[in-house]
Each structure stands twice: as C-alpha cells, then as structure tokens.
Image: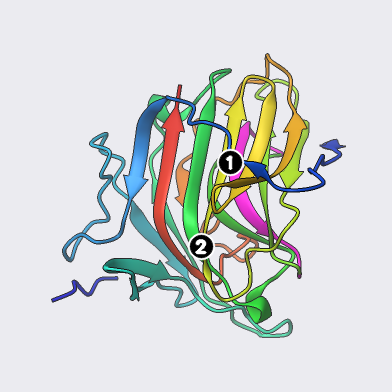
Amino acid sequence: MRSRWFGVLLIAVSTVAGPRPAMADTSGLLAARYTFNAQAGSIIDESGHGHTLAVVSGQGGAVRPVVHGQGAALAFPVHCAARAAICPHVALQAPSSADLNPGTRNIAYGADVLLAPGQTSKGQNVVQKGYSTTSSQWKLQIDGVAGRPSCVLVDDKKPTIRMVTSSITAADGRWHAVACRRTGTTLSVVVDGVERGRTAVPAKLSVTNSRPLSIGGKGAYADNDQFNGALDNVWVEVG
C-alpha cells in the first residue's frame, strides 16, 4: 500500500535551433536524490548524504502524494488566482551543506516535472540553492506563460545571472525529465534527454553559499516563485 504523507545584469540566453542529443553525464558524484517513495515521515535523501528535507509552509500550503509510474510523486499547490487574498506557499528544504556547493566544478541537477498549461506563471522554481541577488546560485525553473524550463548560475563574486531557456515547453500536462548541466564553460538545459538550449559561462564562475537546498519554491513566503505542478525524482550531481 502506498505511503500517505505529507542591480543584477542578465546575460542573454542562447538557444539551439534544433534538438541536440543530450550531453554525456558529468560523471560527478550524486550529492542528493529524492524519489518521494519512502514511508510516512521525513523526506529522506536517497543518495546517502543525509540531506533530509523538511516541509516549510505558509497560508495553508502543503504537498500531497500522487501516483507516478510504479511509485509516488509530490503535488504542490495549484496556481493562485491573480487577485486572491490568500495563496498557499510551500517548499521542501534541506540545510546548506558543502557537498551541494559546486564552486567552479561541473554540476548537473534535475527533476521529473508535471505542469498543466493553465498552471504556468512568470516563474516557478523546481530546485535551487542560493539566491540571485544576495548570494551565488544554481537553479532550475519553469518560466513564463509558455512554461519553458530554464537553468541559472550566479557567481559568488560577480552577481551576473547566467541563464539558458529551453526552446520547447514542459507545461503540457505530461511528465517530462528536465535537467541542467554545467560542463566547463557550457550551461545546457535538457528536456527528455535532448539538449534544448545552451549558453557560455565563465570558467571561473563559482557557486558557493550558505543557503538551503530548496525544492518547489524559494521558501514559504509570498514571493516564493511557487511551483504549481507535481515533482518526482529530484537529483543533484556535483564534480
């Protein structure tokens, strides 16, 4: 039986004209992994590194289990009406850890995402560590009404947002495997195993911060870039 628990400069995006095969794995170390199939209780890190997730919420925000394949995924609050007085907010967070800070090393991170066309917004965070204006950052998000995945890196000394946006949507009511990969001086966004955009990043770009790992939003406050679909198989690979 299934468990039941609950002044920054923006660098222009470079996208590919057509699909490319996904780049090879970075061959890094698995730093965190969440399949959301565990028994009731804490959301454990299945990589073995102990990055247990806690649910942080506001205005009644909550996650709920939904069926995905042979296992479970987590559904987040649906999109809130523009003029709603109260909007639920929720995120899953693990404390900051050195092994989640890639520095100048390669990093890859991603998730399986399910988002309906009518649930898009200006920006919905899938997984991230750090903030673009107050610290360095790596992030995967779903952007705009079109619901296109994008990947972000921000250096810890020069707070310039380096971003690449997918040429296709992931908000069509079907599950998609979405990933970001920084390999040397290239940042790429991959959807269902196919590279859908890439941009150059400086070799010395370094992401190191003391912020938590956060899934589904920046936090539980009002302006948290809430994700409004379902997530599964969230992972981070560093090295």
Could you tell whether 208 is left or right of 233 in the image? right
Picture residue at 27% right of the left edge, 66% below the top: 71
Residue 43: percent from left, percent from top: 27, 55
| Callout count | 2
| Residue 239 x/y as whole percent | 45, 21
Q: Is residue 215 above or below residue 236?
A: below
Residue at which label 1 appears: 180
Stretch of the chain drawn in magenta: 133-145
Q: Who's the residue at 50% across and 76% down the image?
A: 77
Horizontal placement of 149 versus 103: left or right?
Answer: right
Q: Residue 45 location, x and y as percent?
A: 28, 45
Q: Is residue 177 above or below residue 198?
A: below
The quadrant of the picture occupied by the N terminus is bottom left
Vertical arrangement, residue 121 with respect to residue 196, above or below: below
Q: Residue at x 55, y 20 (%)?
A: 103
Is residue 130 something one can see in this rendering?
no
Task: Identify the residue position indicated by label 2 in the image.
Answer: 113
Q: Is residue 139 above or below residue 88?
A: above
Please state the horizontal and vertical placement of residue 105, each as a whole percent of the image: 54, 19
Which of pointers 1 and 2 lies earlier in the amino acid sequence? 2
Pick the residue in front: 121 or 35: 35
Asked whether 137 falls inside the magenta stretch, the response is yes
The amino acid pointed to by label 2 is Val
Residue 203 lies within the magenta run: no
